[in-house]
Image: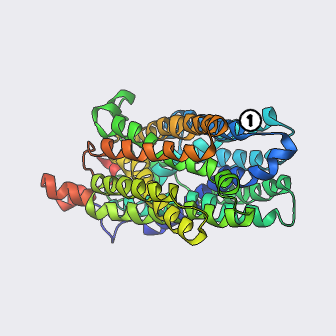
Amino acid sequence: MSNSSTWDSSYEWKAVLVMSAAFGLVGLDRFILPPLFPAMMGDLHLNYQDLGNLVGALGVAWGCSAILLGSLSDRIGRRAVLVPAVVLFSLLSALSGIATGLVSLLFIRAIMGVAEGAVAPTGVAVAVEASHPRRRGMNNGIFQCTISLFGQGIGPILATQLLLITTWRKVFLIVGIPGLIVAAIMAFVLRDPATVRTSGASAPAQRASFWSMFRHRNVPLAMVTLLCAMTGVFVLSAVMPNYLIDYLKLTPQQMGIVTSAIGFGGALGQFGILTLSDYIGRRSATVLSFIVAAVFLWLFIHTGANLPLLFALLWIAAMANFGALAILAGPVPAEAAPLGLMASAAGLVIGAGEIFGGGIAPSIAGTVAQHFGIQYTLYLALGGQILGLLLSLLLKETAPRKSRSTSGGSVSELDQPIASR
């Protein structure tokens, strides 16, 4: 069985780092739109509903792509899906800067969502396959935290500061370039599952059937629970810049700083809470995350234009919200997946969550903001946390350390790589 002396730790860290860089650029290219949107509204004659639809179109496309291309990567290999996807979304991010109106921007962002959707489930599979079983949570945390660190932490500050010296169109062009470099590195570094050597197995066995994924209750349950977490993440990400500027009357630069709390808090949550889940269990960490997210989001909603307090409350709420999302999108479906269907299971869960939480929910939030007031959209995010808390109580524990203590499994059995079971 696998152990520290025989595990290919060199490839493990290379794979995790290159996938983290790619996922960070996914976040930057995806989430650069909301902080630029106040500057775009006048040039392209857009409104709150258009913002919700733009975020939603990318989310729906992302979700459908995650389901289809995650499954495809199980069949044709990780690199064959990941490298073209990273090249495509990078080029489309740059093309967002030449959009002339809502229709062209919707088209570009939707196709961009197709490319980005391939990275999430395939990246989860790469990180799990390359990781020693006792580091699955931590390595998935490193991988997943970069999307919020780059997209919602660095992104709002970068966007608002660049607007002081250039136009929103050129900002899109600038953030699209690094992805092409990362795609080239991925082509040389990543291995497909059959060539990820461990002492337990050198090649994958026969694949299970697609429908066998639903035999483990965590897969359908994670699909529903993840959309609750994603409702919080994507509603906040979509409306926060305009909420802070239009409702709380902050300046664009103040908005950029407060909005960055989503990314910095989210990054810590995705890394820290996923790592914590290796020790206290996936279920316990998810339940705790939803409780903290709901409490601190409620406090944020009832806070005025107090910058330090707004940042602190949003930072903690995002940390917990992203922590729940990371567990549900990563180790929960991966550890429940049948043989040969790891990316398929992750893609199914991520896709379902994205289609509603990342697609339909922001569009609903745009409608609420347009007709009732942008301040009421935050209650939609809060409702997602409360419902997610109730659903997460039904999860079955799968973390290796906790599973051993509850099922009596041996250390060697639980340390065995997923691909060889």
Q: Which residue is mark 1?
A: 106
- Local SS, label 1: helix
Which residue occupies 60% across, 36% down?
A: 368
Residue most extreme to the left: 408
Q: 226 and 187: which one is in front?
A: 226
In the visual, does 128 lie left or right of 307?
left
State which quadrant residue 371 falls in.
top right
Question: Could you say which is closer to the camera, residue 229 or residue 253?
Answer: 253
Amino acid type indicated by mark 1: Leu
Q: Residue 194 in the image: state x and y as whole percent.
A: 45, 48
Tell me the quadrant of the picture where the N terminus can be found. Answer: bottom left
Query: In terms of depth relative to the viewer, which is nearer, 321 or 353?
Result: 321
Q: Where residue 132 appears, x then y in whole percent?
A: 36, 62
Give left or right: position of 214 versus 354.
Answer: left
* Coordinates of residue 281 in the picture (x, y in percent): 27, 57
| Residue nearest the viewer, comparing 328 with 179 | 328
Residue 23, x across and y down, in percent: 59, 55
Say whether residue 28 is left or right of residue 293. right
The number of discs equals: 1
Q: Which residue appears at 45% of the width and 36% of the height?
A: 348
| Image: 95 above or below 262 | above
Is residue 176 at all visible to an observer of this figure?
A: yes
Taking the spot 73% from the left edge, 63% from the top edge, the residue there is 251
Q: Residues within 10 Å of mark 1 (few under 14, many from 20)?
A: many
Colouring scheme, one of rainbow, by chain, secondary structure, one colour: rainbow
